[in-house]
Image (cartoon, grey):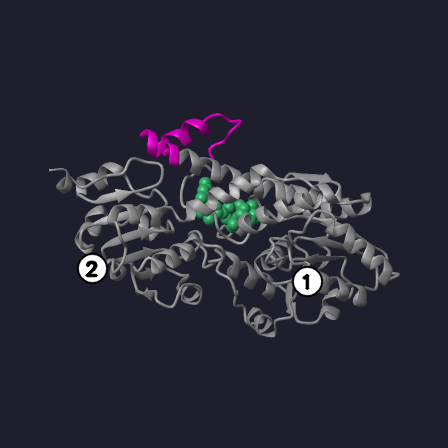
Amino acid sequence: MLSKNIAVVGTGYVGLVTGVALSEIGHTVTCVDVDEEKVALLKDGVSPIYEPELSELMKKNYEAGRLSFTTSHRIAFAGADAIYIAVGTPQNEDGTADLRFIESVVRNIADYITKYVVIVTKSTVPVGTNHHIKRYLEGETEVPFDVVSNPEFLREGSAIQDTFDGDRIVIGADTEMAATLLEEMNEPFGIPIFKTDVRSAEMIKYASNAFLATKISFVNEIATLCEKLEANVEDVAHGMGLDKRIGEKFLQAGIGYGGSCFPKDTNALVQIAGNVEHEFTLLKAVIEVNYKQQRLLVEKAKQHFGSLRGKRIALLGTAFKPNTDDMREAASTVIAEELVLAGAQVVAYDPIAMAQAKVEFPEAVNFAESAEAALDGADAAFLVTEWEEFKVIKANHYVKLLKKPVLFDGRNCYNLEEMKRAGLDYYSVGRPAVRAEREMV
Ligand code: UDX
């Protein structure tokens, strides 16, 4: 196969996974990051992020000499056939994407490239950014180059699996030469490749994330209706998903979407639309539904208890989803804040995101060393992240540990019948509430 010299700028989530994956298929990859501590860790074979299979692949390719790490852009860019930009594009206060890091990488590219290179943008950037990069570089360097948009569609927690078994690779290029080079470089992944122009590729990324977020908010609205109309959203979603045009995925009702992509990208797309004088009404509603959904469990608890003042609440799960320690835009933070505001005493536990939670949560929140310790003596439990270790907790365990057992399940983890038999008050999302027998007699 065609083995290339590749530089990947940014060893965050996207950059590291991309660099490791490209080395695994045989390319020689140099990952560059300005963070010296991080690069030192990486050189020691330690992955700064928690991601299944990543450390093993990183170690294997590092030892094979196909993967290296540096803080020097000059070293990384020397002789590179392709430079991948995989730095963060955080959200500005007004919802637009902050392109500071991209701009800094581009300045380095202008300084250090010496021969034809394809600049590949992995970071999610507003439509038009790659053309902006191109125009800037044209003014700064005589060296020939092409700019390609190659968005990532990785889910945290299954990024390696998604890289090697994804649905598509999107390549947005303006020249046939760059498109062909990228296509050949990516062929070993064995994933369908879709080639298009740069701006359409940039839009595919935003449109995909916005559509998935729409699916989630849609099913969450249906869940609210199901509760009011005594239907069960799980069956409704299943029945809908059997229609191949709809599809069963991303129809899991819950406490809304969080994470590093959906909230940021939906806000950015609303802004992008606004810039061209289009009000993206549908997406605005999706964002609004998500805002309400993240507060749903607290609302249910307020209704159940009347007041939450002095109530001890066990908060199970702080990560925005299982198998990651990421807490960016996690519903857990909103829930912890709202509970503290309502006067509750919060005791939180997460299998791996606890260090993060200690930074993100209000100071008043306490932390427990296990789910059991969090639940012990609490007035109610909030199930926020559907970690496997929570899913296997038996109903009678809640009954034993909680004072007067009430469970607010934001992820529909348990069987309604089992909860009923155990005598719990059990509230989930879009399914009938289970009220303990003792209160009915
Ligand atoms: C997402 C996209 O899936 C990925 O393609 C993109 O590149 C980055 O953003 P990620 O943020 O890692 O990936 O997580 P994902 O598994 O998609 O979940 C996002 C959020 O939606 C989570 O908070 C999750 O709990 C929620 N979700 C997902 C639901 O509430 N219901 C669902 O049916 C699916």
Determine if the magenta segment contains residue 247. yes
Count of picture labels: 2
The range drawn in magenta is 224-250
* Residue under numbered circle 1: 100
Task: Name above or below for residue 384 compared with residue 254.
Answer: below
Q: Tell me the amino acid under the disc marked 1.
A: Arg
- Residue at the front extreme, as displayed: 306
Which residue has dot 2 on it? 377
Quadrant for the C terminus, please.
top left
Residue under the point 52% across and 58% down: 54
Side of 283 where 73 appears, left or right: right
As rendered, which of 284 and 181 lies closer to the eye? Answer: 284
Q: Secondary structure at mark 2?
A: loop
Q: Report crowding for label 1: few under 14, some 14 to 19, many 20 or more residues within 10 A (C-alpha).
A: few
Give residue 18's mark: none
Q: In the depicted view, which residue is nearer to us: 396 or 49?
A: 396
Spot occupied by residue 184 in the image (x, y as percentages of width and height): 73, 46
Going by the numbered disc 2, the residue's amino acid type is Gly
Disc 2 residue crowd, few under 14, some 14–19, many 20+, Cα 10 Å: some
Q: Position of residue 256 (x, y in %)?
A: 44, 45
Look at 73% across and 39% down and name the residue there. Answer: 196
Residue 410 vs residue 374: left or right?
right
